[in-house]
Amino acid sequence: MATTTDLGKPVGVTLDRYITLAQDAFTIATGELSQLLRDIGLAAKILNREITRSGLLDLEGAFGAQNVQGEAQQKLDVVANIRFKRALTNGGQVCALISEEEQEVITINPDANYLVAMDPLDGSSNIDVNVSIGTIFSIYRRKSEKGSQVTEEDVLQPGRDQVAAGYVLYGSSTMLVYTTGRGVNGFTYGPTIGEFFLSHHNIKCTPDGKIYSINDGYWNEMSEELRAFIQKCREDGCTARYIGSLVADVHRNLLKGGIYIYPPLPKYPDGKLRLMYEANALAMIVEQTGGKASDGRQRILDIPVRDFHQRTPLFIGSANLVDECLQMIS
Ligand code: AHG
Ligand code: MN
Ligand code: MN
């Protein structure tokens, strides 16, 4: 029977087909997680349609409100949140949703087994300038009994308890990349057919990358140790790449090898990125490919969650580069 790792690189395998093949490898699987992954795939297709037409549909620009982080919401942030919420509600497999765009936990179906944490649209500052943006998602299994109220223990699970995680990158092509803890696979969207097809099978991140990604505008606010690491990257012949959309920056470094850094800064003492719906999913993906993810002190996936909107510094990417960076800054 085919499994996620022995499929080889088949041609013309859709996301739905792949999810079914992977599920068939587990006799105890009920199909609920598979359905949830399909629901996310469907929402990604719908959002992709909005994104590609945003300049024509008056979907660019600010929405006129702030999210829980006090950041100005863009119209597409709001649209993305609605699209995913609707798909997860219709799909019926999610008991609760944590979203960057929602102050509170949204309860959906008390009879469902899974919780989702998501950044519906990542890289908002790039929407209006036609630069890659993304969606990030984490999936957890609830700890409490099905049918009961979702508890704090369900919501505040550490990243290591994710049962699946992934992202969608709306770039020069649209890709969905996900893991259920048995390797990472990428699917490219074929817009004329309306399906995601397996295009990047069993992605591996090289341990020694040559790209460093950090917002250089914060140079004066970085620690001396971090500046020394950046300086070393330059001397070692690394190249700098920074898009400003976390999904796109991490995806590039995953495929090419490199390190992405968002350090603690005076204006963001705990870092800027959100643990539950940005860092954790990407950390699971990157670890599954052989890479590493840390907050500078500990593994991202082991950070205890106190608040589902909490932030974290992030050092993520090729294993040896991340190790080298952590040694220099600690
Ligand atoms: P979001 O659009 O979901 O708020 O996320 C923006 C994040 C992340 O995508 C990106 O890497 C980072 O903010 C960029 O921050 P700086 O502009 O401070 O570099
Ligand atoms: Mn984001
Ligand atoms: Mn966002």
Image (tube, helix red, strand yellow):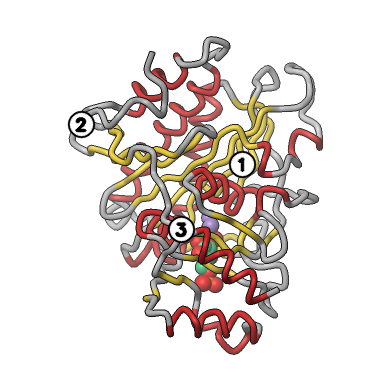
For the residue pair 8 and 135, the one nearer the viewer reads as 8
Identity of the residue drawn at 81% across and 37% down: 152
Residue 73 can be seen in this image:
no
> Is tag 3's residue or tag 1's residue first in the polypeptide sequence?
1
Which of the labelled discs sits on residue 193, or is there none? 2
Q: Residue at x 41, y 45 (%)?
A: 168
Residue 46 at x, y percent in the picture:
36, 37
29 relative to 110 in the view: left or right: left
| Outermost residue to the top | 27
* Residue at numbered disc 3: 207
**Tag of residue 20:** none
Q: Nearer the viewer, mark 3 or mark 2?
A: 3
Mark 1 and mark 2 residues within 8 Å of each other at the beta carbon:
no
Looking at the rendering, which quadrant does residue 164 occupy?
A: top right
- Eyeballing the image, is 198 above or below 284? above
According to the image, label 1 marks what residue? 117
Q: At numbered mark 3, what does the secondary structure look like: helix, strand or loop?
A: loop
> For numbered disc 2, what is the local secondary structure?
loop
Q: CA distance from mark 1 to mark 2?
A: 29 Å
User: With respect to residue 272, does 289 lie above or below?
Assistant: above
| Quadrant position of the C terminus in the picture | bottom right
Tell me the kind of residue under disc 2: Ile
Residue 195, given in percent of the width and then of the height, sits at 28, 31
- The image quadrant where one finds the N terminus is top left
Q: Quadrant of residue 324?
A: bottom right
